[in-house]
């Protein structure tokens, strides 16, 4: 099999993520309401989970290529069945 730079996949079964928001967005939030998962009167949220990152580049025609980037993240500590999806 020939090595290709058009496909790359990274699987990380143990990784972390830190979410930081400015305090003005979480100041005075009612109980149970979050801003990007960050609770009221806090500015950070730490998550521990798994991530899969994939990159695929395909040539559609001469001088025209399309790049696909997919990032998946699941938080083991809170609702692991919910997966964050980022596709570009």
Image (cartoon, rainbow, N blue to C red):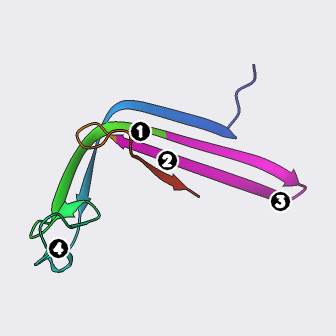
Residue 71 is marked as: 2
Q: From the image, state whether disc 2 or disc 4 is nearer to you.
A: 4
Q: Earlier in the sequence, mark 4 or mark 3?
A: 4
Question: At numbered mark 3, what does the secondary structure look like: helix, strand or loop?
Answer: strand
Q: Residue tagged by mark 3?
A: 64
As drawn, 60 above or below 73: below
Percent position (x, y) of residue 80?
A: 33, 39
As drawn, 10 above or below 72: above
Give how far apart the Cα atoms at labels 4 and 3 are. Answer: 44 Å
Q: Earlier in the sequence, mark 1 or mark 2?
A: 1
Give how far apart the Cα atoms at labels 2 and 4 are. Answer: 26 Å
Asked if the residues shown at circle 1 and circle 3 are in contact, with their CB atoms under 8 angstroms apart, the answer is no
Residue 51 is marked as: 1
Give how far apart the Cα atoms at labels 1 and 2 are. Answer: 7 Å
Q: From the image, state whether disc 1 or disc 4 is nearer to you.
A: 4
Give how far apart the Cα atoms at labels 1 and 3 are. Answer: 30 Å
Residue at 56%, 41% in the rendered image:
54
User: Is 20 on the left-hand or right-hand side of 69?
Assistant: left
Relative depth, front residue between 74 and 32? 32
The quarter of the image holding the N terminus is top right
Q: Earlier in the sequence, mark 2 or mark 3?
A: 3
| Quadrant in the rendering for residue 77 | top left
Q: Earlier in the sequence, mark 1 or mark 3?
A: 1
User: Is 81 on the left-hand or right-hand side of 32?
Assistant: right
Q: Main secondary structure of the magenta part?
A: strand
Percent position (x, y) of residue 4?
A: 71, 33
| In magenta segment, residue 68 | yes
**What residue range appears in magenta?**
53-74
Residue 43 is marked as: none
Percent position (x, y) of residue 32?
A: 16, 63
User: Is 88 on the left-hand or right-hand side of 83?
Assistant: right
């Amino acid at each position: 099999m020939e090595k290709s730079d058009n496909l790359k996949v990274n699987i990380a079964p143990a990784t972390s993520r830190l979410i930081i928001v400015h305090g003005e967005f979480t100041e005075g939030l009612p109980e149970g309401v979050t801003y990007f998962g960050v609770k009221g009167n806090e500015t950070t949220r730490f998550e521990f989970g798994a991530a899969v990152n994939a990159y695929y580049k395909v040539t559609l025609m001469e001088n025209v290529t399309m790049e696909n980037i997919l990032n998946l993240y699941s938080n083991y500590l809170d609702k692991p069945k919910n997966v964050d999806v980022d596709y570009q």
